Image (cartoon, helix red, strand yellow):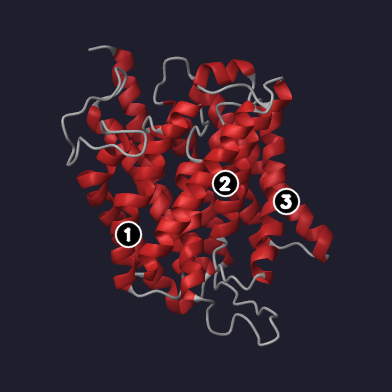
Amino acid sequence: MDPIYLMNNLWIIICFTLVLLMQGGFILLEAGSTRMKNAGHIAGKTIFTVGIASLVFWAVGWGFIYGEGNAFIGLSDFFYGDYSAGEDLAPAVDFMFQLAFAAIALTIAFGGFAERAKLTAYLVFAVAFSAVVYPIVAHWIWGGGWLSELGKQDFAGSTVVHLTGAMAALAATIILKPRIGKFNKDGSANELAGHNQVYTALGVLVLWVGWFGFNAGSTLEVADAFFGYVALTTMLAASAGAIAAMFIVWALSGKADVPTMLNGALAGLVAITASCAFVAPWASVVIGIIAGILVYGSMKFFEKMKIDDPIFALSVHGTAGIWGTVSTGFFATPELAAMNGGSAGLFYGGGFGQLGVQVIGVVSSGLFAFVLSFIILKV
């Protein structure tokens, strides 16, 4: 058997494991960012919903994303149907890797439920989101749908995973309303501090490590070692996001703030997820810096709008996901765009074409995920 084929499959199974372990990062991040009385509930629902996401993805999710269908949705290969992966991967390996991404998107969505939802709500929404919301957006961009045909660039999921999850979280946050005691009658906010910043920091570190499976694993092969380049841009953006967030909160509030710094690192990771295979290293630093600044401003904005977001999913995954998706329309180099799909960005003489496609992708995917999630939750 071809040794490269074996290496590709081993590499992707390792990356699947890294992405799955990101759920442990989310457990620590969410538990540490909320009050102790809810820590066990948060940890338990994460394991519970990963199980649901896996079964639903096996039943219909994969088929709706990658099955033969139309520009809107796939309509074949349900229950691990008779499909074939590319020449470089065994079908089961490809399936497992994509399953892990679906589970992450669901976990992000549940950030909007934190400290306010019953187990039955998690159950019903987990099934609906994993069966319909996530797969349709993923089909549009990764499964040969209409955004894919336009040349939408989203290498590892700033839109597909992060923005989709964040818009579902926004719908949940609006419907569930703020936690009791979060806002005063005059509109001012009270800080309902998380109970353990060590958990939160460790959670971010686990997520950071897992992200190399997320982004670098999306190369789906080892042949040209391009995964190393993707890992480099990922590392630089995360680092820049953490530093930028720390400095902006320090400059504007007069004191350093650990949660903001941690969210800056995550924002850099989310932002580079779309563009990690399309941009030069210097651009990844710029993308991370802007993400770190944006996440701080976004956190303040949502609080001012009286939207209670305990783990800052809307800012980290939503705002940074939008910026990361749009950034490829500015920074994508001609060489990397030719290698990975789409066209060069505005700053490389590509005009507004790719930038326009990225904006269309953000608006259409974000609106679809929000509206459908809102309807499901309201019903």
Residue 8 spot, x, y in % from top left: 34, 22
Residue 137 spot, x, y in % from top left: 41, 43
Q: Which of the numbered marks, if any, corresponds to residue 293? A: 3
Residue 293 spot, x, y in % from top left: 73, 51
Q: Which of the numbered marks, if any, corresponds to residue 321? A: 2
Residue 23 spot, x, y in % from top left: 40, 53
First in sequence: mark 1 vs mark 3: 1
Query: Can I make out residue 171 in this image?
Result: yes
Count residues near mark 3 (Cα–Cα under 10 Å), then give few for <14, some for 14-19, many for 20+. many
Q: Is residue 180 above or below residue 147?
A: below
Q: Determine the secondary structure under disc 2.
A: helix
Residue holding disc 1: 126
- Taking the spot 49% from the left edge, 32% from the top edge, the residue there is 155
Count residues near mark 1 (Cα–Cα under 10 Å), then give few for <14, some for 14-19, many for 20+. many
Residue type, mark 2 in image: Gly
Residue type, mark 3 in image: Ile
Quadrant of the rendered structure where residue 67 is? top left
Q: Nearer the viewer, residue 175 or 109?
A: 175
First in sequence: mark 3 vs mark 2: 3
Question: Which of labels 3 and 2 is toward the front?
Answer: 2
First in sequence: mark 2 vs mark 1: 1
